[in-house]
């Protein structure tokens, strides 16, 4: 029961953080097509934007985890398949975290 | 439909084979073409249910998009000549990227508006049937307006 409340709280807190991030992003007025840029040169020279993308992605994935868990529990009956899909989603989130950590490590090592 | 449901509820506690026989005999007797198996799961979804399912579906799609985007960024920085990067490059550059991006923005706007409604529900607000029906329409309209605003501001 305690765990369920914690998971529920995590999803709501991350939702508020995402709203705050979007609001900050709109207030800063940097919302443009460049936000969706995949040009590495541009992103390397605009570390603030990259940091925003990283923060947004990681918080969004933390927000997604409880939702994915409930979807898996609702639509998959086999407990082993449930465990497999849940581990897969955790692996996806871990890979995102590692990807951004590696990118920032590389960029900061070049400074 | 009501007849079938009443009939099934009446014999709900009996064993399955006996229940099937009863349904069959009932349908033969009244010359009604009922399905052989109970189809109580076939019903018209209310709009709130469709929106709730759409909230979940868009959430999963956004999760997949964000994950693959982070992988794409990683391969751009570390392995720009790898097969995986070339594969992801198809989805994140050129026309396909813009096409995907438009869907990403649409799903994001919808998920945001629908999520705000869920936050209101968490605060025990808006449970009255009128407000639920009103918020159904409000979520759709707000999502479409937000989507058009974002697309307009991005492309202009």
Image (cartoon, rainbow, N blue to C red):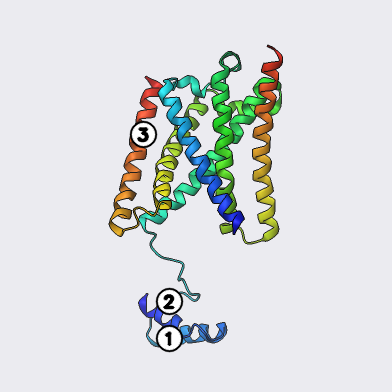
Callout in the foreground (1, 3): 3
Q: CA distance from mark 1 to mark 2?
A: 9 Å
The C terminus of chain A, quarter of image: top right
- The residue where tag 2 is placed is B34
- Asked whether residue A12 is in view, the answer is yes
Q: Position of residue B6 (x, y in %)?
A: 40, 81
SS label for mark 3: helix
Q: Position of residue A63 (x, y in %)?
A: 55, 42
State which chain disc 1 sits on.
Answer: B
- Disc 2/disc 3 C-alpha distance (Å): 46 Å
The x and y percentages for residue A20 are 46, 33
Chain of the residue that carries numbered disc 2 in the rendered image: B
Residue at the spot 65% in from the left edge and 27% down from the top edge = A100
Mark 3 — residue? B146
Task: Identify the residue under disc 1.
Answer: B26
Classify A108 as above or below B66. Answer: above
The residue furthest front is A2
Residue density around tag 2, few if under 14, some if 14–19, many if 20 or more, within 10 Å: some
Chain letter of mark 3 equals B
Check whether the beta carbons of the residues at disc 1 and disc 2 lie within 8 A of each other: yes
Query: Along the horizontal axis of the image, is A49 left or right of B77?
Result: left
Residue sitting at x 56%, y 15%: A46
Q: Earlier in the sequence, mark 1 or mark 3?
A: 1
Disc 1/disc 3 C-alpha distance (Å): 54 Å
Q: Nearer the viewer, residue B97 or A88?
A: A88
Mark 2 vs 3, N-terminal side? 2
Q: Give the image quarter of residue A19.
A: top left
Element under disc 1: helix
């Amino acid at each position: 029961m305690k765990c369920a409340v914690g998971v529920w709280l995590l999803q709501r807190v991350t939702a508020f953080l995402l709203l705050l991030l979007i609001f900050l992003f709109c207030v800063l007025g940097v919302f443009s097509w460049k936000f969706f840029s995949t040009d590495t040169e541009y992103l390397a020279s605009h570390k603030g934007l990259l940091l925003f993308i990283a923060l947004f992605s990681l918080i969004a994935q933390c927000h997604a985890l409880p939702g994915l868990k409930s979807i898996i529990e609702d639509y998959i009956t086999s407990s082993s398949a449930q465990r497999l899909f849940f581990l897969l989603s955790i692996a996806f989130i871990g890979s995102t975290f590692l990807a951004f950590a590696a990118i920032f490590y590389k960029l900061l090592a070049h400074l | 439909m009501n007849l079938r449901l009443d009939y099934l509820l009446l014999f709900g506690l009996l064993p399955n084979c006996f229940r099937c026989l009863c349904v069959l005999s009932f349908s033969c007797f009244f010359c009604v073409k009922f399905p052989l198996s109970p189809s109580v799961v076939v019903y018209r979804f209310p709009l709130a249910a469709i929106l709730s399912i759409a909230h979940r579906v868009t959430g999963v799609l956004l999760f997949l998009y964000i994950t693959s985007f982070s992988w794409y960024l990683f391969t751009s920085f570390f392995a720009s000549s790898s097969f995986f990067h070339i594969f992801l490059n198809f989805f994140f550059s050129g026309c396909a990227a813009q096409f995907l991006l438009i869907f990403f923005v649409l799903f994001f706007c919808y998920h945001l508006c629908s999520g705000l409604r869920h936050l209101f529900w968490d605060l025990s607000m808006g449970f009255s049937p009128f407000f639920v029906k009103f918020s159904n329409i409000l979520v759709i309209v707000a999502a479409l307006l937000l989507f058009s605003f974002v697309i307009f501001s991005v492309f202009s």
